[in-house]
Image (tube, rainbow, N blue to C red):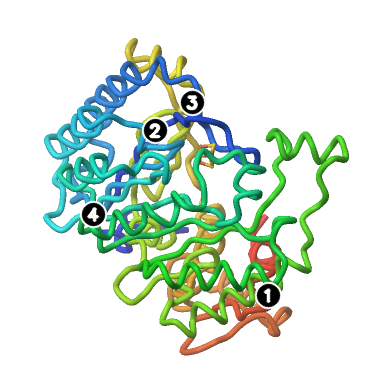
Amino acid sequence: MVSASKNRKFVSLSGIYIHIPFCKQACTYCDFHFSVNMNSKPELVKAILLEIDQRKNYLEGEEIETIYFGGGTPSVLSEDELNSILDKIKKEFKVAKNAEISLECNPDDLTEEKLEQLKKAGINRLSIGLQSFNEEELKWMNRAHTAAESLNCVKLAQDKGFDNITIDLIYGSKFQDMESWERTLQTVLNLNVQHISAYNLTIEAKTKLGLDHKKGTEPEVSEELSSEQFKKMIEVLQKNKFVHYEISNFGKANFFSKHNSNYWKGTRYLGLGPAAHSFNTESRQWNISSNSAYIQKVNANELYFEKETLTTQEQYNEYILTRLRTTWGCDKKEIEKRFGKEVLSSFEITVKKYQNYFDSKDGIITLNIEGKLKADFLASEFFLE
Ligand code: SF4
């Protein structure tokens, strides 16, 4: 068995995630928690400030290395709303001097004035949801921006001094054949950004895309085409000095997402806002996914989250799930130290069974390209019941 205090040896810095659950319009493929009705935005921001008061001891005084505004669309926050959250965090937590402070934004929000406000507020990493450069595809996705706006906003952000920019891309849709995907990759390279997150389009049941798919008006995503595009992306980006450090993430040296890397390395984080998750190595908790219920319960100081304490098995499964996806891989020494000899031996049996999908060096097991295509399946093969 592993004690909590033993686990703590593996962590030293913490992160804060703030979920801003508002979007101008609903993208057809998205199943995140958000609302297109922004009437409750001021109240929700106030509730987040109150949640900070209620949960300021969750990280037990650890220094905050990363702050991440995700969503939803955090770029819909006004200057005052953003500053009020950041000021409160800085007041109640010890934030590292060089903390990475990221904010997800959509191209249509990034005016010169907005970028200046973000810079002034201390945002030092912009995550821009470009998704595609194909007008028809953007319309099909119901994105609120054009391809031209996508290209312009990156340039504008660079002109305003943002030197740590990541963009989001989606591949595998019916609009992308191999030729257009290669053109997309070239366009991305020309943008001269430091980081790229690229996600395979998935059809989620409760989305517009999912409903259209059920009706038979949208085709299945072609696994074969997605796999080819994934491999092409790795080839092109690696040739251009991007490190493929997690299945969906590519970064230039020194520009990996610290916040997300910390998730994958199992450090602690506090999640604020509706639907946000928190993790303290022993338990995981998640806030209610309803803006109105969240506001009401935070104001009444009632319970607004569910919580599960992780068993050793669950901690091991989580270790596999997160680490296997990354360039840091699964470390046999760490597995033995944290979970014991028996678990290590079960781990080794699975590695042997699927050896064609793994690379192994100095006791560290990572996925090769074919393995990356089957990451979820392979991770589940390691899981302890
Ligand atoms: S993809 Fe982003 S902008 Fe679109 S609905 Fe989802 S959270 Fe909102």
- Give the mark toward the camera: 3 or 2: 2
Residue 199 pos. (x, y %): 58, 58
Pick whichever of labels 1 and 2 is earlier in the sequence.
Answer: 2
Mark 4 — residue? 124
Give the CA separation, mark 4 to mark 2.
18 Å
**Is residue 6 visible from the viewing direction of this image?**
no
- Give the mark toward the camera: 1 or 4: 4
Mark 1 — residue? 350
Q: Secondary structure at mark 2?
A: strand
Pick whichever of labels 3 and 2 is earlier in the sequence.
Answer: 2
Give the CA separation, mark 1 to mark 2.
40 Å
**Is residue 211 visible from the viewing direction of this image?**
yes
Mark 3 — residue? 288
- In the image, what residue type sits under mark 2? Ile
- Residue 380: which numbered mark, if any? none
Residue 264 pos. (x, y %): 44, 60
- In the image, what residue type sits under mark 1? Thr
In-image side of 63 versus 221 (left or right)? left
Give the CA separation, mark 3 to mark 2.
13 Å
